[in-house]
Amino acid sequence: MSDSRIGSRRLTDVPTLVAAARDGDHRALARLISLVENEDPALPSLAAALTPHAGLAQVIGLTGSPGVGKSTITNELVRALRARGHRVGVLAVDPSSPYTGGAILGDRVRMQDHATDDGVYIRSMSSRGHLGGLAAATPQAVRVLESAGYDTVLVETVGVGQAEVEVASLADTTLVLLAPGMGDAIQAVKAGILEVADVFVVNKADRDGADATYRDIQGMLGLVSRQPGEWRPPVVRAVAAKGEGIEDVLAAIDKHRGWLTAHDELRRRREARATAEIEAIALGTVRERLSSLRRGTALPQLAARVAGGSLDPYAAAHELLAGLRSSSA
Amino acid sequence: MSDSRIGSRRLTDVPTLVAAARDGDHRALARLISLVENEDPALPSLAAALTPHAGLAQVIGLTGSPGVGKSTITNELVRALRARGHRVGVLAVDPSSPYTGGAILGDRVRMQDHATDDGVYIRSMSSRGHLGGLAAATPQAVRVLESAGYDTVLVETVGVGQAEVEVASLADTTLVLLAPGMGDAIQAVKAGILEVADVFVVNKADRDGADATYRDIQGMLGLVSRQPGEWRPPVVRAVAAKGEGIEDVLAAIDKHRGWLTAHDELRRRREARATAEIEAIALGTVRERLSSLRRGTALPQLAARVAGGSLDPYAAAHELLAGLRSSSA
């Protein structure tokens, strides 16, 4: 039986899907994340159903350039977290791809290592980009995994642009992966990664140039001024392909987790994240209402007056928003 | 006397600045474009003052990868348009740079060729990205130039990303520049340039590989299905550094201009542009109102409830927008 048949049968029945996902039904879980990814109209009711389970999981973000070994490290972290008894969800988010249709093949390949393990769920995700895009979709997908009992969620982003940084920074702890000889240290500064990284991992640390990369990033971290008690991101060396250094990475994550709790930073971060999420949804809602106006008469009439030189665009925008308020009040 | 001193003296006096710019005062013109660039609070009143002069200029967009010879072609087009008696304004827009502070040095270097010519005005522009970003700022800067009597405005964008394409497509006629051996044809397809280009120019047409580039782009244009009467972008060869092919480029622009008029496309395009502009300003206004809420108590309280798991983010966004409506009604 295909996932989509299940989906279409239960599409409107969010509580049933949530209950099935909690019982370990991976197809129900997949269906729920698709609802999030596709920004299904049922999303607000899904969000309401997930609320009681929100905030239970530890969320770890991973980002880094292509080729630094993100999926290898993720794989090894999953293995190590499983050994500790955690249930682990992985969201591989690609902000640059507007819609992958699920990226199922890649997931299946990646799932092979954990195929028989019910305590691991790996899923690629993109966003059609309507209601708030990935800034809203990612936390929502995290909540789906939380509600299904995954107590650790890894959010892996592809690339090192601003969008990737934003997604990675939705985590409690953000890991930035580097590798020797990729000029990553400079890239990291450019993309604003220095500001969001909680832990740096120099992967492929057995290769030439690893020491230089380590020194580069330590040097740059040394230039950042910090308040007393402020977190200084540690730089951890690893050779993920050989399973080396993974325990050190986990130790750094644990230490950061301790710091978050001790300084009330976990609450502060999650509130900041919720703020960004609410704003993204609100803005997405307004954007959708505005574009629905293109089908009406008000916006085309305003546009014709602006194009014809009888109205300025600020006055037109003002008028448009006034109309939006009265129509949606 | 520096530009900024003039500016600070007359900052609140938009009508005086507009009148001075119309009288050929380049410093007043620079000041007005800075108001647009900096998204000055005086912008709505500036927009109102410019409205009577809107829509008078022909707007030509130019885009292409670094190294294709954009500034050389722009320079030669300015020369040729001047020979025809036009007054020419050039806006060099860099969407990737959030704020250059005017990029004055580059402008001065580029101005040298036309330094003694009062009928040419060249200006770099970026956007702080508040109220609608470059989608709103560029048409507004075009209006400033229109109001100062420039009847032709070239909008040149740096790069070939989506943002550059959007800015270039604000024009009546959009030129896409290619050069041999840069893989531009493929890039053009990726970035959606094929959809916005009205004229392709293969520059450096005396170099190896120019024929291949010409064939590549013609081949790709051949794959696009068109309705009868629909515009098929011509591909023009040029060697701008030697001044060769510039008249052919102008002829292609003229031909496109004729097609726009004959098919009522000029009106349609300008209304579409005005629609995008109004929406960008409206969305920017809402974004600004939302972020002003961060300083209040409502949004932090909603965020705390979402982070704490007692409210879902969609319900929070709904509540936020309801509050926004009642506070700004």
Image: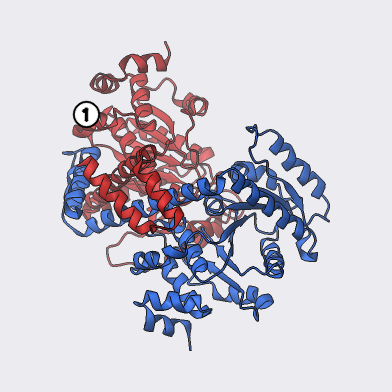
Chain colours: A red, B blue
Above or below for B219 versus B119: above
Residue B258, horizontal then vertical, whole percent: 65, 49
**A34 and A223: which one is in front?**
A34
Q: Is residue A150 left or right of residue B105?
A: left
Residue located farthest toward the front when viewing the structure as drawn: B262
Q: Quadrant of residue A171?
A: top left
Figure label count: 1
- Mark 1 residue crowding within 10 angstroms, few (<14) / some (14–19) / many (20+): some
Chain that bears disc 1: A
Q: Is residue B308 left or right of residue A160?
A: left
The residue where tag 1 is placed is A49
Determine whether the residue tagged by mark 1 lies in a helix, strand or loop: helix
**Which residue appears at 37% of the width and 69% of the height?**
B40
Residue A165 in sight from this viewpoint: no
The three-letter amino acid code for the residue at tag 1 is: Ala
**Which residue appears at 44% of the width and 77% of the height?**
B19
**Which residue appears at 40% of the width and 57% of the height?**
A310
Residue located farthest toward the bottom when viewing the structure as drawn: B1
Above or below for A199 versus B46: above
**Which residue appears at 43% of the width and 64% of the height?**
B52
Residue A230, horizontal then vertical, whole percent: 30, 62
Above or below for B186 versus B70: above
- Quadrant where the C terminus of chain A lies? top left
Q: Quadrant of residue A298?
A: top left
Above or below for B315 versus A178: above
Q: Is residue B259 left or right of residue B123?
A: right
Residue A137 in sight from this viewpoint: yes
**A104 and A61: which one is in front?**
A104
Residue located farthest toward the top when viewing the structure as drawn: A1
Residue A229, horizontal then vertical, whole percent: 27, 63
